[in-house]
C-alpha cells in the first residue's frame, strides 16, 4: 500500500488518467456506433464502463484509508438511488481485503511499541486474519508475564496502515475531485457533507487511543449485560497506531442466517435492543454497522462487540428531537413527523409538497416496526422497499442535507434493520422501544409516559 503523500497522489492521478482514457474510448465507441446496446444508453456515464469499474475497485482497495472509508459510507445508500455500476464498485470495495506486507507492519509496531515488542508475545502471526479501511488485525498470544497481569493470553493486535492518518485530508480532496469530475454519484447526495463527515470520522478512527477509551467505556456500560461482551484492553501494548485486546471467539453475524428461528430471533432482538440503549440509555453509540463487528458464540449465547473506532456521543438537544421524531413515527402522526423533522433539520419548511410527503412517508415507514404491537416479523416486511421508493423523489427535491449526526446514526440503525431482515428475525420492537425510551430524561426533565 502506498504510504506517503507523493505516492498516494500519484495513484489518484493515475486513476484519473486511466478513467479519462477509458471514458474517451467509450465515448468514441458510442459516437461510432460500435458500443454495446447498454453502453449506448444516454443514462449511463461514459466513465462507468466495465474496464473503469475494475480500475476504480483495484485502485481504491489498494489505497485503503479515506478511499475505502468513503466507499463504505456511500455503500449504505440504497443501491437503487445510484447506477448499478457505482453500486457494484461500492459493494466490491466494501468486501475487499488487501493486506499490507509484514515489513510495513514491523516498521509501525517498532515505532509505536519499541524494537523489542515481540518479546511481549509468546507468538505473533505475521499473516493477518482481517483487514479494514485503516488497519489490519493479527492473532497473537501474550507472553506469560503479560498474561498474568491481564488474565488472558490470546489477543487480536490491530495495526494501522502506514500513511493513512497523514493522508486523510489530501486523499479526500482527491477523491472529491474525482467523483465530481466523473459524475459517479446522483444529484442530491450532498457530497460535500459526506466528505466532511468522512473526514471527521477518519480522524477519529485513526486514533487508536480514542478507540481504546471507547472500548473501555463500552466494557463498563455492558459489564452486567446478559448478552453482550466487550474485549478487554491490553493497554501496555496499545498506542495511537496499535491496539491490542482480548481475542473474541464467535461467528460473524453475516453468517448467522442459517441458525434456527429461535436463535435468529434472539440475535435480532438484542441487536435492536442495543441500538436503542446506545441512543437513549448510554447516549453513546458504536456507529459502524459492519456485521463482522459482531460475533455470536454458539457455546455461550453471548454476542461480542468489536471495533469501537466509530464510537461517538450525541448532543442532548439532538437526542431529544430525534426521540420525538421516532415517537411520532411510532404513533403514526404525520404532522408531528413533519414538525420534528423540521426542528431537527431534515426539512427547511420551504420544500415542495412532494418532498415533504416523501420524507414523512419514509419516516413513518421506519416507525412501522415500533408501531406494531407484539412481535414484528422482519421476514415479512415491506419497509425497505417502501423507503427505497421515496429515495429518488428526495434526491431530486431535497433542499438541505440531513443533520450531520444522522450520517453515522442512520448507518448503524439501517445496519440493525438490514440484519434483522437478513435473519428474518421476529422482534418485539414496540416493547423494546417503550421499555428503553420511557427511562429517557429530556433536557427539561420530562419523560415519556406510555
Image (tube, rainbow, N blue to C red):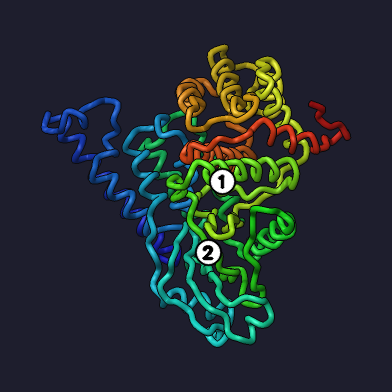
Whether 76 is drawn above or below 396: the answer is below
x and y percentages locating residue 170 in the rendered image: 49, 55
Instruction: Write the residue at 69% across / 23% down.
Output: 328
Earlier-in-chain disc, 2 versus 1: 2
Q: In this view, does 125 lie to the left or right of 322?
A: left
Q: How many labels does the image show?
A: 2
Whether 250 is drawn above or below 194: the answer is below
Q: Nearer the viewer, residue 270 or 305?
A: 270
x and y percentages locating residue 230 in the rendered image: 64, 60
Q: Do the residues labelled 2 and 1 touch (CB within 8 Å)?
A: no
Q: How dense is the environment of label 2, judged by Cα within 10 Å: few (below 14), some, or many (20 and up)?
A: some
x and y percentages locating residue 285 in the rendered image: 66, 48
Q: Name the residue under label 2.
A: 249
Q: Which of 381 and 175 is in front in this view?
A: 381
x and y percentages locating residue 235 in the rendered image: 66, 73
Q: Can see residue 166?
A: no
- Asked where in the image residue 336 lies, by quadrant, the reply is top right
Mark number for residue 267?
1
Q: How dense is the environment of label 1, judged by Cα within 10 Å: few (below 14), some, or many (20 and up)?
A: many
Instruction: Write the residue at 48% across / 57% down.
Output: 251
Q: Which part of the image, by quadrant, shows the N terminus?
A: bottom left
Q: Can see residue 201?
A: yes
Instruction: Write the residue at 43% across / 74% down.
Output: 104
* Mark 2 element type: loop
Amino acid at each position: 500500500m502506498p504510504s506517503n503523500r507523493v505516492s498516494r497522489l500519484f495513484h489518484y492521478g493515475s486513476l484519473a488518467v486511466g478513467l479519462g482514457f477509458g471514458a474517451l474510448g467509450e465515448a468514441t465507441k458510442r459516437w461510432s456506433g460500435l458500443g454495446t446496446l447498454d453502453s449506448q444508453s444516454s443514462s449511463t456515464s461514459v466513465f462507468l464502463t466495465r474496464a473503469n469499474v475494475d480500475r476504480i475497485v483495484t485502485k481504491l482497495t489498494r489505497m485503503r484509508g479515506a478511499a475505502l472509508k468513503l466507499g463504505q459510507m456511500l455503500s449504505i445508500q440504497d443501491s437503487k438511488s445510484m447506477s448499478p455500476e457505482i453500486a457494484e464498485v461500492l459493494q466490491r470495495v466494501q468486501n475487499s481485503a488487501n493486506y499490507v506486507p509484514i515489513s510495513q507492519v514491523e516498521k509501525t509496531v517498532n515505532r509505536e511499541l519499541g524494537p523489542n515488542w515481540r518479546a511481549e508475545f509468546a507468538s505473533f502471526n505475521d499473516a493477518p486474519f482481517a483487514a479494514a479501511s485503516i488497519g489490519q488485525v493479527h492473532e497473537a498470544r501474550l507472553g506469560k508475564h503479560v498474561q498474568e497481569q491481564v488474565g488472558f493470553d490470546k489477543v487480536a493486535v490491530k495495526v494501522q496502515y502506514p500513511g493513512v492518518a497523514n493522508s486523510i485530508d489530501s486523499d479526500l480532496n482527491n477523491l472529491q475531485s474525482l467523483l465530481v469530475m466523473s459524475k459517479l454519484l446522483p444529484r442530491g447526495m450532498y457530497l460535500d457533507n459526506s466528505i466532511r463527515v468522512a473526514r471527521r470520522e477518519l480522524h477519529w478512527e485513526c486514533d487508536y487511543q480514542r478507540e481504546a477509551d471507547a472500548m473501555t467505556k463500552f466494557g463498563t456500560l455492558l459489564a452486567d449485560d446478559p448478552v453482550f461482551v466487550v474485549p478487554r484492553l491490553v493497554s501496555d501494548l496499545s498506542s495511537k497506531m496499535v491496539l491490542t485486546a482480548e481475542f473474541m471467539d464467535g461467528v460473524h453475524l453475516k453468517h448467522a442466517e442459517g441458525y434456527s428461528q429461535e436463535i435468529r430471533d434472539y440475535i435480532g432482538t438484542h441487536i435492536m435492543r442495543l441500538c436503542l440503549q446506545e441512543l437513549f440509555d448510554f447516549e453513546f453509540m458504536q456507529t459502524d454497522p459492519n456485521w463482522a463487528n459482531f460475533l455470536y458464540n454458539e457455546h455461550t449465547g453471548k454476542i461480542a462487540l468489536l471495533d469501537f473506532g466509530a464510537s461517538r456521543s450525541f448532543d442532548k438537544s439532538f437526542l431529544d428531537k430525534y426521540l420525538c421524531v421516532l415517537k411520532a413515527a411510532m404513533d403514526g402522526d404525520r404532522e408531528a413527523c413533519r414538525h420534528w423533522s423540521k426542528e431537527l433539520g431534515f426539512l427547511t419548511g420551504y420544500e415542495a409538497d412532494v418532498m415533504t410527503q416523501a420524507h414523512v412517508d419514509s419516516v413513518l415507514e421506519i416507525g412501522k416496526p415500533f408501531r406494531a404491537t407484539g412481535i414484528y416479523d422482519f421476514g415479512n416486511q415491506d419497509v425497505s422497499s417502501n423507503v427505497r421508493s421515496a429515495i429518488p423523489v428526495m434526491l431530486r427535491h431535497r433542499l438541505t442535507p440531513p443533520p450531520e449526526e444522522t450520517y453515522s446514526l442512520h448507518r448503524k440503525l439501517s445496519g440493525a434493520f438490514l440484519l434483522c431482515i437478513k435473519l428474518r428475525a421476529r422482534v418485539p420492537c414496540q416493547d423494546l422501544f417503550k421499555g428503553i425510551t420511557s427511562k429517557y430524561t429530556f433536557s427539561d426533565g420530562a419523560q415519556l409516559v406510555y
